[in-house]
């Protein structure tokens, strides 16, 4: 009798067990909260304050990855060298490339010229594709909950369409369509809303004195009112530029989890709200 009870408990546990998954950055964890609430345990590898371009996972994270079923990659640089290591220690790990079906463009200024821009998640349009790729993978692994994933995905897509519409309206009358930023992470946002991103960083480094002068000249010409920085990088040259131009420094992290709120706030700053 006892054995049967034990077996029943095991069965119940396995039916309600959450799927262990891992993601590269916090916005992907937010997407999972939208499309798979209560269905997954999520491990985030690169937390705000760290750079997804150069991150090295900690031993405790490697432990978590050895128990994960899915890794949701998003195409940031650290994945190039680490995905093979994740797979080597956990051959059952399904690696899902959530940047599938997203057209990438070169970064227009800063970082490696000509290299494709990896910051795809700061665009409502791209977020819809990323969320669909994630939902498709979850349905493949956990077909029993197909309806829930699909319904949640549709709800999230409606939210993103609403955000997109709001931003379009907010920025429709904006005269100055340039914005100044230290690290060029809002390129897809700029593309979606017909804006121009001017980066301070040159090929991933602080600009030299001469490069700084040319950025200041350009910024003066465009009449920008703020400079965006992010906590993941040095504030030195941004503070210098802000002082020189008498403009405000505004910190935004592209890694902030609540991506809808983050994108909406960025648009509000641009709209002067
Ligand atoms: Zn970046």
Image (spheres, rainbow, N blue to C red):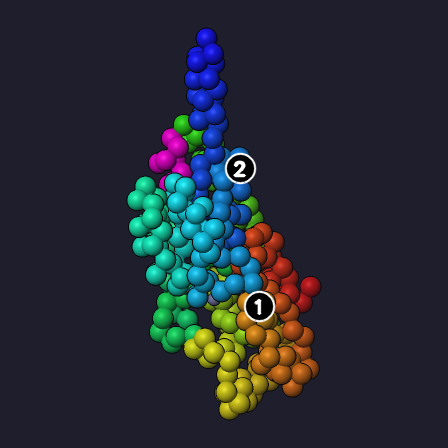
Q: Residue at label 2?
A: 37
In the displayed orientation, state which residue is furthest to the front: 2
Q: Residue at label 1?
A: 230
Residue situated in front as seen by the camera: 202 or 23: 23
Image x and y of residue 36, in percent:
49, 38
Identify which residue is drawn at 35% across, 74% down. 114
Q: Is residue 184 visible?
A: yes
Q: Which quarter shows the C terminus?
A: bottom right
**Is residue 172 one of those drawn in magenta?**
no
Q: What's the magenta region?
A: 136-143
Identify which residue is drawn at 56% across, 53% down. 257
**Count of numbered labels shown in the rendering:** 2
Image x and y of residue 252, in percent:
60, 64
Identify which residue is drawn at 64% across, 69% down. 250
Image x and y of residue 139, in percent:
39, 35
In the displayed orientation, state which residue is furthest to the top: 1
Q: Which secondary structure, mark 1?
A: loop
Q: Which mark is residue 115?
A: none
Q: Are marks 1 and 2 in contact (CB under 8 Å)?
A: no
Residue situated in front as seen by the camera: 254 or 127: 254
- What's the magenta bit mostly, secondary-structure-wise? helix
Relative to 209, say whether 49 is above or below.
above
Looking at the image, residue 45 sits to the left or right of residue 113; the answer is: right
Looking at mark 1, is its residue's CB closer than 8 Å to ligand 1?
A: no
Q: Residues within 10 Å of mark 1 (few under 14, many from 20)?
A: many
Q: Which secondary structure, mark 2?
A: loop
| Labels 1 and 2: the sequence-earlier one | 2
């Amino acid at each position: 009798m006892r054995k049967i009870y034990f077996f029943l408990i095991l069965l119940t546990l396995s039916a309600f067990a959450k799927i262990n998954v891992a993601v590269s950055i916090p916005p992907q964890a937010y997407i999972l909260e939208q499309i798979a609430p209560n269905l997954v345990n999520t491990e985030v590898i690169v937390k705000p304050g760290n750079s997804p371009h150069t991150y090295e996972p900690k031993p405790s994270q490697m432990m978590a990855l050895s128990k994960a079923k899915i890794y949701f990659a998003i195409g940031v640089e650290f994945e190039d060298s680490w995905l093979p290591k994740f797979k080597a220690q956990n051959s059952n790990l399904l690696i899902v490339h959530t940047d599938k079906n997203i057209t990438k463009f070169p970064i227009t200024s800063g970082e490696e010229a000509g290299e494709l821009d990896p910051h795809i998640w700061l665009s409502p349009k791209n977020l819809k594709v990323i969320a669909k790729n994630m939902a498709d993978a979850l349905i493949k692994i956990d077909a029993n909950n197909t309806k829930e994933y699909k319904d949640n995905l549709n709800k999230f897509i409606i939210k993103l369409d609403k955000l997109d519409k709001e931003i379009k309206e907010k920025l429709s009358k904006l005269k100055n369509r340039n914005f100044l930023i230290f690290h060029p992470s809002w390129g897809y946002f700029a593309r979606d809303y017909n804006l121009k991103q001017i980066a301070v960083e040159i090929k991933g480094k602080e600009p030299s004195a001469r490069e700084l002068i040319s950025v200041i000249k350009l910024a003066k010409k465009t009449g920008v009112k703020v400079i965006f920085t992010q906590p993941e990088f040095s504030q030195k040259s941004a503070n210098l530029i802000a002082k020189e131009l008498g403009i405000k420094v505004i910190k935004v992290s592209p890694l902030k989890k609540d991506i809808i709120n983050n994108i909406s706030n960025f648009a509000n700053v641009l709209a002067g709200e």
